[in-house]
Image (cartoon, grey):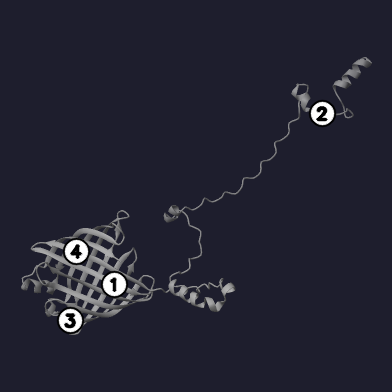
Amino acid sequence: MSMIALLLLAAQQPGQGAPPAAACAPEHAAMGHCTMPETPPAPLPPPPPPTPPACAPEHAAMGHCSLPQSSPPADVGNAPSPPAPRVDAADAIFGADAMAAARTRLYKEHGGGKISLVMIDLAEVRLRRGGEAYVWDAEARFGGDIDKIVVRTEGEGDFGNALDKGEVQSLWSRAIGPFFDVQAGVRQDFGPGASPTHAVLGIEGLAPYWFDVEGALFLSDRGDVTARLEGSYDQRITQRLIAQPRAEIDGAFQDVVALGIGAGVSSVELGLRLRYEITREFAPYVGIAWERKLGGTARMARNAGQDVSRPSLVAGVRLWF
């Protein structure tokens, strides 16, 4: 073999001392002159830990998740009131002594002020079998936020006849919480027949779900004990149109023959009135009412030739000032 062939064979089969092949530049690889070595892809970063979805209130109500716990709200109803702010900016100009009278009047008129209200809740005509009747229920309040005087009156009668029954109560009312007052005082009945005087102990307020409730015990000067429970609810249909269901239950702890009242639950009255507030202070209404005597009271009414059940159509006005 010639020398030239040996050199060519050595060039085709490089040995240990052969120089390394030239690197393949990217532009040469793009023109097809060489092939770039393959490089392994870079490892991907690990995925982030999954974030738990927010707990919606409706999902918590179904038991699918739990809402985050938060600190309970402060008991606003029983928390002590903060001290009254001191308005003393004008003291720097006029002096504290010159501003003392104005400050005293300011505190008197803005906090602990006196209020007055006259509410005629029912002033109505009742159309019933055998004739028409009139009914009233009203009260007046005078005083402050905690203590006040309440004068209340109610009664009914038939047109063209004597008054059936009526009463006036004079009560001292004291707030025992944000929504309830305890009341004590005197009640005087008037009308035909016996007109006893009663000592009164009662409670009045706004029950949960906005029910107006009143309850009272009466001890007459003859030792008779009677009770009364009333309730009503204003259901707004619109901002001016209001439906008001009402209920009253009367009872006695013994027979009161002079007043035609038997022991136990003596009577119940149910009603539904629909009123339209022309203004907040003046609202005519129409509705229905149903009175029913029960137990011994019904028996005494039958013996006296009176009806024990009296449905009525009512029309009246509610106003306050």
Name the image quarter holding residue 249. bottom left
Measure the alpha-carbon separation of dots 1 and 4: 18 Å
Of callouts 1 and 4, which one flags the residue occurring earlier in the amino acid sequence? Answer: 4
Q: For the residue carrying disc 4, how many other residues have a C-alpha within 10 Å: few (<14), some (14-19), or many (20+)? A: many
Q: Are marks 3 and 4 in contact (CB under 8 Å)?
A: no
* Residue identifier under label 2: 23
Dot 1 corresponds to which residue?
A: 140
Q: CA distance from mark 2 to mark 3?
A: 123 Å
Q: Looking at the figure, which quarter contains the N terminus? A: top right
Which element is circle 1 on?
Answer: strand
Q: Nearer the viewer, mark 4 or mark 2?
A: 4
Tell me: 283 left or right of 94.
left
Name above or below for residue 41 compared with residue 267. Answer: above
Which percent across, then down, holds residue 61?
Answer: 42, 56
In the image, residue 68 above or below residue 230: above
**Helix, strand or loop for disc 3:** loop
Q: Quadrant of residue 219?
A: bottom left
Q: Earlier in the sequence, mark 3 or mark 4?
A: 4
Q: Position of residue 201 (x, y in %)?
A: 28, 79
Alpha carbon distance from label 1 to label 2: 107 Å
The tag on residue 223 is none
Q: CA distance from mark 4 to mark 2?
A: 110 Å
Which residue sits furthest top?
Answer: 2
- Mark before the other along the chain sequence, 4 or 2: 2
Image coordinates of residue 246 in percent, x first then y, are 24, 64
Label 3 sits on residue:
196
The residue singled out by tag 4 in the image is 124
Element type at marker 4? strand
